[in-house]
Image (spheres, rainbow, N blue to C red):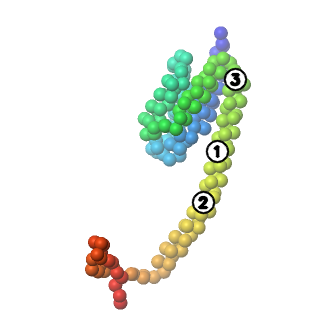
């Protein structure tokens, strides 16, 4: 029988595993980054880690399908998001594996998997940063052009004359021409 300290260590390790698995789940990260859960999206994602831990602790021998349903319900209720990309199954299987390994005392395998997930998450962030940097340089050019246009229009009033409508064209369109001075 496991001692209380071993059980506590297994729970703590499982909690780190849940955090790593959910932290690498693109569907959840997109929901958080885009505020699908409202102003408290980040807090909801952190709450979700504890809710998943509690779900596993409260239910014996969960199957991935049960975890799928639980995660789908949370994502729908908290983030107004339906997951249809197949990632629910992957995350559920990973969580079930972590839980089973923690209960069996296979901490080394869980630590290794968490390290792989952390590496994967770091690579994804680096790729996103690189993409944002590339996008940012073109956005800066667009912003400078917009600012120059605003400066030009602010340098003095240059009202354009109101358009005057002319006779109807044969296909039913109204021809609009600039008023001549």
Q: Residue furthest bottom?
A: 181
* Residue 63 drawn at (x, y percent): 53, 21
> With respect to residue 5, does 130 lie above or below?
below
Visible residue check, residue 78: no
Q: Quadrant of the N terminus?
A: top right
Q: What's the distance in space between the residues labelled 2 and 1, CA to CA?
A: 18 Å
Task: Tell me which corner region of the image, top left, top right, bottom left or bottom right, holds residue 124.
Answer: top right
- Crowd class of label 1 (few under 14; some 14 to 19; many from 20; radius 10 Å): some
* Residue 2 drawn at (x, y percent): 66, 13
**Residue annotated with mark 3:** 107
Q: What's the distance in space between the residues labelled 3 and 2, CA to CA?
A: 42 Å
Side (left or right) of 54 relative to 172: right
Q: Residue at x 55, y 35 (%)?
A: 87
Q: Earlier in the sequence, mark 3 or mark 1?
A: 3
Q: Are marks 3 and 2 in contact (CB under 8 Å)?
A: no
Q: What's the distance in space between the residues labelled 3 and 1, CA to CA?
A: 26 Å
**Residue annotated with mark 2:** 136
**Residue annotated with mark 1:** 124
Q: Residue at x 56, y 28 (%)?
A: 92
> With respect to residue 68, does 139 lie above or below?
below
Q: Residue furthest front?
A: 170
* Residue 170 drawn at (x, y percent): 28, 75
Q: Residue furthest top?
A: 1
Q: Earlier in the sequence, mark 3 or mark 2?
A: 3
Identify the secondary structure beneath mark 2. helix
Visible residue check, residue 36: yes
Name the residue nearer the viewer: 168 or 111.
168
> With respect to residue 115, does 165 lie above or below?
below
Identify the secondary structure beneath mark 1. helix
- Crowd class of label 3 (few under 14; some 14 to 19; many from 20; radius 10 Å): some
Task: Tell me which corner region of the image, top left, top right, bottom left or bottom right, holds residue 97.
Answer: top right
* Residue 118 drawn at (x, y percent): 67, 37
């Amino acid at each position: 029988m496991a001692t209380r300290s071993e059980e506590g260590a297994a729970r703590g390790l499982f909690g780190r595993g849940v955090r790593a698995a959910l932290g690498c789940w693109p569907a959840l990260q997109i929901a958080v980054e885009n505020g699908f859960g409202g102003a408290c999206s980040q807090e909801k994602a952190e709450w979700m880690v504890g809710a998943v831990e509690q779900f596993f602790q409260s239910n014996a021998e969960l199957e991935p399908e049960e975890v799928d349903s639980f995660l789908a319900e949370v994502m729908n209720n908290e983030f107004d998001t339906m997951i249809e990309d197949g990632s629910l199954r992957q995350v559920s299987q990973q969580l079930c594996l972590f839980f089973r390994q923690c209960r069996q005392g296979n901490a080394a395998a869980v630590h290794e998997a968490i390290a792989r997930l952390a590496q994967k998450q770091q690579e994804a962030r680096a790729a996103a940063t690189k993409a944002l940097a590339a996008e940012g340089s073109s956005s800066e050019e667009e912003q400078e052009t917009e600012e120059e246009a605003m400066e030009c229009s602010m340098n003095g009033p240059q009202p354009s004359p109101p358009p005057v409508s002319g006779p109807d064209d044969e296909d039913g369109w109204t021809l609009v021409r600039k008023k001549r001075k």
